[in-house]
Image (cartoon, rainbow, N blue to C red):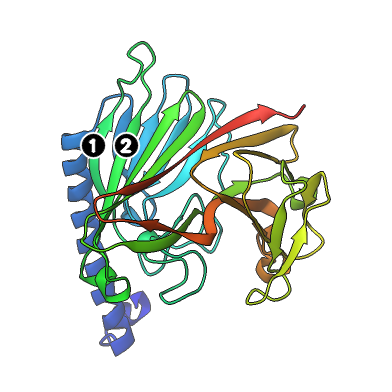
Amino acid sequence: MQACIKSGCRPSAPAFGGRVRSELRRAQVKVCASAVADLQKKHGIPGSVEFVEGNGGLPSVMLKHACGASAQVYLFGGAVCSWKQASGDEVLYVRPDAVFDKSKPISGGVPHCFPQFGPGAMQQHGFARNLDWEVASTSADLQPDEADPEVELVLSENDYTLKMWPHKFKAVYTVTLHGEQLRTDLRVMNTGDKPFDFTSALHTYFEVLHVDKAKVTGLKGLTYLDKSQDPKNPAKQTEQRDAVTFGQGLVDSVYLAAPEHVELEVGTGAAVAIDATGWEDVVVWNPHLTMKDCYENFVCVENAITNKSITVQPGESWRATTNFQVVDVQ
């Protein structure tokens, strides 16, 4: 377009369309900047909770612990997209094909799958990961001597959700930094007058040194559904290995009635210890050559409700928590 202007000719239609899109984009960025400023004024806590423009100008909240650890949570999708140790080392992984323009869910970090895990009656993994969550509150006074920064996000039904899932609900998601540990607390409340069923997961992506060096422990003896060959008719097997390994092919396994504690060794001599309550299953996934540009760099270990849906009666609620901690491999 610059060459066209210099020669004195009129811009072509595509160039003009590009200019319009550029102007629209600038207007959207201004709106996001204003929204971030308003959030910071209302909910920001100096030194602990800061609202900032994330990738693509999307509103996000930075949690900063006094020890030096940090986490970044995007309001779009309620997705935690960064969790760093005090050393600055990133624990989570965001795929290189991730986009931050709301055209699709953010590919990486800790996306939500709700009220459906996987394919089904509605869109893949439900709608919670491609909607804006609202900020309900922030705090940093759980331990006054060493404040734990925290944000509470809320998602409720709207016209968009009711078209695919005709239920009134309120999902409350709390993300906390406790020292270098990342904690999540998800509560799903039935605010309607009829019961509803749902499945769900935290589809967590963890960065690994190399997929060949990664392994998940704590699953031996469990029954699992192997979806790698036929996702619609997964083979039911019993895990015989001390550790689930990667790099030889697609791994897509749903471990049923999983223990509350599992660990992912990332290949550096460290592991991510995952402790959960309320989440009944664990999904282990690596796409192998179906994502050959990035599969070597991450493994997903997902706390989930997949095999049997949860039923919530009117006025009642369901709750699940996770605690993620980086530990040395014993």
Q: In this orientation, which residue lies closer to the viewer: 18 or 249? A: 249
Percent across and percent down for residue 145 are: 36, 10
Mark 2 to mark 1 CA distance (whole Å) = 6 Å
In primary-sequence order, the first of circles 2 and 1 is: 1
Left or right of residue 91: residue 82? left
Residue 137, labelled with which disc?
1
- Residue shown at the point (56%, 57%) measured from the top left: 95
Q: Is residue 277 depicted above or below 250 in this figure?
A: above
Q: Residue furthest top?
A: 145
Left or right of residue 257: residue 24? left
Report the quarter where the N terminus lies: bottom left
Q: Three-letter amino acid code at disc 1? A: Ser
Q: Is residue 78 visible?
A: yes
- Residue shown at the point (37%, 78%) measured from the top left: 3
**Element under disc 2:** strand
Left or right of residue 151: residue 325? right
Q: Are marks 2 and 1 in contact (CB under 8 Å)?
A: yes
**Element under disc 1:** strand
Query: Toward which corner of the image does residue 174 lie, by quadrant?
Result: top left
Q: Is residue 259 depicted above or below 29 in this figure?
A: above
Percent across and percent down for residue 94 are: 53, 53
Percent across and percent down for residue 99 are: 44, 63
**Mark 2 lies on residue:** 151
Few, some or many residues within 10 Å of mark 1 (<14, 14–19, 20+): some
Percent across and percent down for residue 234 are: 69, 71
